[in-house]
Image: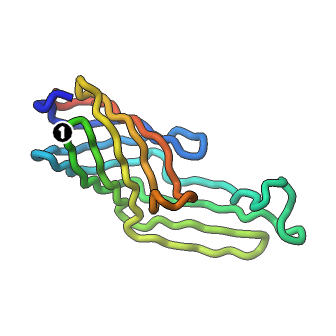
């Protein structure tokens, strides 16, 4: 990446998680090696079922029903990060509550998180118009941490 390329401006793209693509838009200002701005997520409601613990596709334990979940994220988040050469790293912190509801038959539990954060790390293309990389939630050393890929392309702004 040319050192004179400024990443300030509007970006659009997606992140991939659990086999799906989820649209995102980012507006950032670069001041020296720092990035600040905002991101919005198109998809904010997710439904699923926890995986079968032993992988045999049978109910566990003693005929228990699978645990269902619904996750609701705020649509906007704050971006704070850094740029060093072609390497970009930023933290996306959701503004508001991230609620997850779990249920198994009649029993339901709600967990609410404030300041849910996702770490993005990527590389800027030589022309400064595309950023590709990986995101993760939680400790990267934990084999169960959530991770996936992302792509952002410049919508408008300086080149």
Which residue is more in the foreground, 17 or 83?
83
Quadrant containing the N terminus in the rendered view: top left
Relative horizontal placement of residue 85, taking residue 120 as reference (left or right): left
Residue sitting farthest toward the front: 141
In this rendering, is residue 121 above or below 97?
A: above
Q: Secondary structure at mark 1?
A: loop
Q: State which quarter of the image contains the C terminus.
A: top left
Q: Is residue 130 left or right of residue 18?
A: left
**Residue 60 location, quadrant:** bottom right
What residue lies at 78% left-to-right and 70% top-to-bottom?
105
**Measuring 79% from the left and 54% from the top, which residue is drawn there?**
55
Residue 48, percent from left and from top: 66, 55
Farthest-out residue, top: 127
Q: Badge 1: few (under 14), some or many (20 or more) residues near its Cα, within 10 Å? A: many
Residue to which mark 1 is pinned: 8
Q: Position of residue 158 (x, y in %)?
A: 15, 30
Residue 40 position, x and y percent, is 36, 48
Residue 90 on image: x %, y %: 29, 51
Q: Nearer the viewer, residue 126 or 157?
A: 126
- Labels in figure, total: 1
Towards the viewer: 15 or 121: 121
Please give the name of the residue rendered at 18% of the width and 39% of the height, measured from the top-left corner: 8
Query: In the visual, does 84 lie left or right of 89?
Result: left
């Amino acid at each position: 990446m040319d050192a004179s390329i400024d990443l300030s401006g509007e970006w659009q793209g997606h992140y991939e998680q659990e086999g799906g693509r989820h649209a995102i838009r980012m507006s950032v200002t670069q001041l020296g090696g720092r990035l600040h701005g905002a991101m919005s997520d198109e998809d904010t409601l997710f439904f699923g079922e926890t995986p079968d613990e032993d992988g045999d596709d049978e109910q566990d334990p003693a005929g228990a029903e699978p645990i269902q979940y619904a996750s609701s994220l705020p649509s906007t988040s704050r971006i704070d990060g850094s740029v060093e050469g072609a390497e970009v790293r930023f933290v996306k912190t959701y503004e508001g509550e991230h609620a997850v509801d779990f249920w198994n038959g009649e029993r339901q539990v709600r967990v609410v998180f404030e300041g849910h954060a996702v770490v993005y790390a990527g590389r800027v293309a030589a022309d400064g118009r595309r950023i590709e990389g990986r995101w993760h939630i939680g400790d990267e050393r934990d084999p169960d941490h959530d991770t996936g890929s992302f792509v952002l392309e410049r919508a408008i702004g300086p080149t």
